[in-house]
Image (spheres, rainbow, N blue to C red):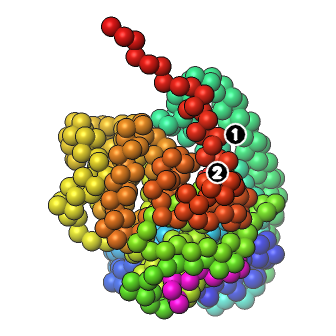
Amino acid sequence: MGWNQHADAFLELGFRAMLRRLPSLLAASFRLARQADRRAARTVLASEVGRGVAQAVSLLAVNSVLGRLMAGGQIEQRLRDALPALVTLGVLMLVGALLRAATTYATGRLEPKVERVATERYLERAAAVELAAIEDHAFHKLLDTAQYGAASARRMIMFGTRVVNAVISLVAAAGVLTVLHPVLLPLLVTMTLPSAWSALTLARRRYESFHTWVQHSRAGQLLSRLLIEPEAAPEIRVHGMGGFLLRHFRVMSETAEAEQARLARLAARTGLIAAAWTGLATAATYATLGGLLLGGAMALSVAGTAVIAVRTGSQSLESLVVEVNALHEEALFVGDLERLSAEAAERAIPVGGAALPEAPREIRFENVTFRYPGEAARPALDDVSLTLPLGRIVALVGENGSGKTTLVKLLAGLYTPDRGRIMWDRVDAATADRRALAERIAMVAQDFKRWPFTARVNIAVGRSSAPLNDAHVADAIAEAGAGEVVADLPRGLDTLLARDFSGGHQLSGGQWQRLGIARAAYRRGSILVVDEPTAALDARAELEIFDKIRALASNGQTVVLITHRLASVRHADLVHVLDQGRLVESGTPDELLASGGVYAELYSLQAEQFSRAPVPAPKAG
Ligand SMILES: Nc1ncnc2c1ncn2[C@@H]1O[C@H](COP(=O)(O)OP(=O)(O)OP(=O)(O)O)[C@@H](O)[C@H]1O
């Protein structure tokens, strides 16, 4: 939208600039409303315009009533003369009340819809961006601030409606005042300027403070959540971390409180200055009216109407200022949402692209370099060239932090290389259709998500785009050897795997790992990436899982296996050894053992642990 503005721009905005932006703000509110519910939006607009017109006509009717009542002649005659205008006033009040009811109903319907539309847009955009964007601090800050945009969009409708109402009644009052005496109009404006200044100043400070403190308050919330989180609960108790976390929470809260106190102090001071200014201006207005009366420049009935018009006008102007300001403030938050949308669109996972070969023979990393954003001393992958022959088991081996997980994330298209290419036969993955690429991959990541859903859904989310298929779920469970895990669940596949919900059940790490593997099996990607699949499994389960993985590969599925258990790597067709982001060795396990390099060294280190602790022979008898 056109009113999309950088946050800092607000800090230079003055009152005039804000008024200049008023039409576009109103248009933006109306557009939002129309997107959510066209009919309700039209009803609100029509009712508010109607109410404004009714107010203007009411003022004229009041003038007519006063004029008739203060004219010469019998009081009965004067009352009779004033009667039509009085009836008009009554009808106008009724119309006003009906229109207000229509607005109340329509905005009540409209506001939640606007919030939902805006929230959906926020979530949709956030879900569609590259992983790198989600991990980028600046983008995350934008996500943080923009989340308030949806509620602001809802409030924009409310304030927008009030602004329309205030503008129309102000125009009505100003029109009547100008007709009564031209000097009254500038006086009306002078009376209202102080509250305009004060409201604007306060809003500016609030917004500035919000942007400075948003990360701080997120950190505070994080700390308070950690204190009640079930995952953190054991460590908090065993390591006695409660006091430590609470202390930090208090320090953070106190800092935030100090900021609130600062804002309150400034608000009180600004309010006081504004009130003094308004008092002086009001006194000047009534003194002028008195002067006009005394000098005979104005009739008493006209002065009466003027007093009413000045009061309605100043109320409208004051509410206009306050509401425009509120509208503007909300628009800034919606502006954050707009900025997020724009940035998210730029950082979105591209749609479409070259088709991947139906049955590629190999995937080649050609001089791939990748560095995570931030201040990492070295790239996570540095000039890596290697081949992943499809339909085989390829193992990635290396010490912690050597780049194995990063490599498979690049393979899955989660990141794109800074330099070099990843070729699927002759197609560069950077130009390929990313969705189609992801379709081919099934991944059991090291930190795979333990969804707070039922066991069935936890497996079937492996392919959530297709309708849930119970037969496939059963196959996947069998392939992953997760039958026993499911059989032990109190309600089988329908058991909720979220301990913090009633009826929820907690699985052990190894049990979860089997479900994770079942999820990947359910996905049926042609390339199965398993990152430390047996880290939480016991020795028997580990052997079993590797057997299953071997069976998958013998069915033609490619398996990319990351593991530190080098004994399990023996069955791989090809092993790539990484060290500090560089490829240092490649070959079959036997070749690598024979060459006496890094792999052989790591292998013998692990083998030594067993040879040093021989299995005691069972005692005879
Ligand atoms: N999301 C990330 N943001 C920034 N740096 C990261 C991120 N993930 C990994 N790194 C860094 O990249 C390097 C390689 O990490 P990677 O996870 O690929 O290693 P790994 O070989 O899989 O290690 P491990 O055996 O411990 O799982 C490390 O130095 C790590 O700190």
In this picture, is 538 found above or below 547? above
Furthest residue toward left: 471
Which residue is label 1 attached to? 253
Residue drawn at x 76%, y 51% is: 263
- Residue 183 point in image, percent of width and height: 76, 85
Q: Is residue 11 left or right of residue 97?
A: right
Against 124, residue 496 (above or below) is: above
Q: Main secondary structure of the magenta part?
A: strand
Residue 139 seen in the figure: yes
Considering the numbered disc 2 on the image, is that residue within a helix, a strand or a loop?
helix
Decide which of 431, 392 is in the foreground and name it: 392
Q: Find residue 232 and report its horizontal and vertical position in percent.
A: 54, 35
Q: Nearer the viewer, residue 590 or 567?
A: 590
- Callout 1, which amino acid? Ser
Q: Which residue is mark 2?
A: 600
Q: Earlier in the sequence, mark 1 or mark 2?
A: 1
Which kind of residue does numbered mark 2 sit on?
Ala
Quarter where residue 105 is shown: bottom left
| 199 vs 455, nearest the viewer | 455
Judge by depth and name the residue closer to the eye, 203 or 498: 498
- Residue drawn at x 53%, y 90% as measured from the top left: 426
Label 1, label 2: how far apart the Cα atoms are: 54 Å
Screen quadrant of the C terminus: top left
Residue 81 picture location, percent across and down: 41, 84
**Magenta stretch, residue numbers:** 417-427
Estimate the x, y position of residue 411 in percent, counting from the top left: 54, 72
Q: Residue at x 27, y 71 (%)?
A: 466
- C-beta proximity under 8 Å, tags 1 and 2: no
